[in-house]
Image: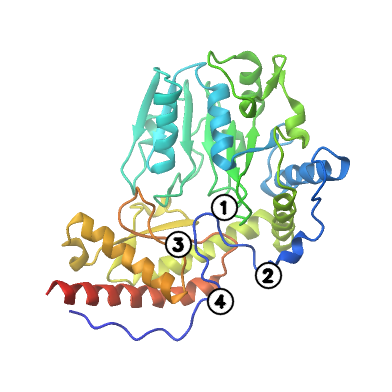
Amino acid sequence: MTDTLRRPDTRPASPLFSSGPCAKRPGWSLDVLASASIGRSHRAKDPKAKLLRVIEDSRTILGIPDDYRIGIVPASDTGAFEMAMWSMLGARGMDLLAWESFGQGWVTDIVKQLKLDDHRLLDAPYGELPDLDAVDFSRDVVFTWNGTTSGVRVPDGNWIPDDRQGLTLCDATSAAFAMDMPWDKLDVVTWSWQKVLGGEAQHGMLVLSPRAVERLESYTPPWPMPKIFRLTKGGKLNESIFEGSTINTPSMLCVEDHLDALDWSRDIGGLDALVARSNANFGVISDWVSNSSWAAFLAQDPATRSTTSVCLTIVDPWFEALPGDEQAAAAKAVSSLLDKEGVAFDIGAYRDAPPGLRIWAGATVEQDDLAALMPWLDWAFQSIKTELGTAAS
């Protein structure tokens, strides 16, 4: 059995590599909340102006077209995407794409909760994508841009035609602010503050194309609509939602924090700089994987590998010879050891994913911290391999 490696000398300055909530931007402190509009109505002039600024700064940084509506909605990305599904689906048949946990969750809600019959499932196992050429765009298409729990993303938007008849509904929560989004190909896009920009939880963003607005104003779902899902009023889009008047009460502390993250994004160079930081971070992990004897990407195709939620699988022969439950325990032991050492928190694979590691490499993570982490991965794996191998013998 291989001896444990020498414990690395250099530790990451920050051990925060969680895939959500994610690390704050470099240099963040509680001081950024000093000007928060706390103790005030979110409908008052100044607090509402801050909510509108979140909308407009997001539009500017992401390059969202002027005729697309952007709203702040309840319950994080989940709430935003549920709102879109419950408000718009059922008008025509659907192609549902799923290759990881969250995509499968949307399928479950459509099939078992909304009980919509005219659906076609295009799925793939963890590490792969469904056949994108098989998608029928005469139907509505539901998909995630970046599979947060599998580390697999769509390579681009070229598979989506300009002359589609249905709507494209895209969950982009671990892609927005880290990947280029082809807005002309997307009709509904959602994300949450706590992902790429490291904001606080429970606030979602909902983007609607003119085609999506047309659907909302021409189609009334047959099921009851909860208040927090209602996007129309009197048969027309409730424009106030997209002008800073949220459906329910937001946290103005979280708003202030997100404004700070948006300011930082703009100060470092906007979307191009954010994408570049994520790509550079991913490059650190990719270079390490290319020289690793025991770790590999869960994503099979290099063109579909996520640059934010980087999912790794363990390919060491000792590990692969273990029964499934022992593989899961061994992988968990590796992440737990790194947590105990204080060098990497929350990097275990998602509970539904194959055993392995998941490392966040979004823009708020520092490249030097990832570089410092890589030797610790080797140390932790070899330590657990030695410990469990010795125990087994």
Q: Would residue 246 appear left or right of 95 to someone viewing this image?
A: right
Q: Residue at x 58, y 30 (%)?
A: 83
Q: Which residue is mark 2?
A: 27
Mark 2 lies on a secondary structure that is loop
Q: How many marks?
A: 4
Q: Position of residue 34 (x, y in %)?
A: 80, 61
Q: Amino acid at mark 3?
A: Asp
Question: Which of the two labelled residues, at mark 3 and mark 4, occupies the earlier sequence position?
Answer: 4
Q: Earlier in the sequence, mark 2 or mark 4?
A: 4
Neighbour tally class for label 2: few under 14, some 14-19, many 20 plus, Cα within 10 Å: few
How far apart in space, not on screen, are marks 2 and 4 (Cα)? Answer: 12 Å
Q: Which residue is mark 3?
A: 346
Q: Quadrant of residue 266?
A: bottom right
Q: Position of residue 96 (x, y in %)?
A: 41, 30
- Label 4: which residue? 13
- Residue named by callout 1: 195
Q: CA distance from mark 3 to mark 4?
A: 16 Å
Looking at the rendered structure, the kind of residue marked 4 is: Ala
Q: Which class describes the residues within 10 Å of circle 4: few (<14), some (14-19), or many (20+)?
A: few
- Looking at the rendered structure, the kind of residue marked 1 is Lys
Quarter of the picture containing the N terminus is bottom left
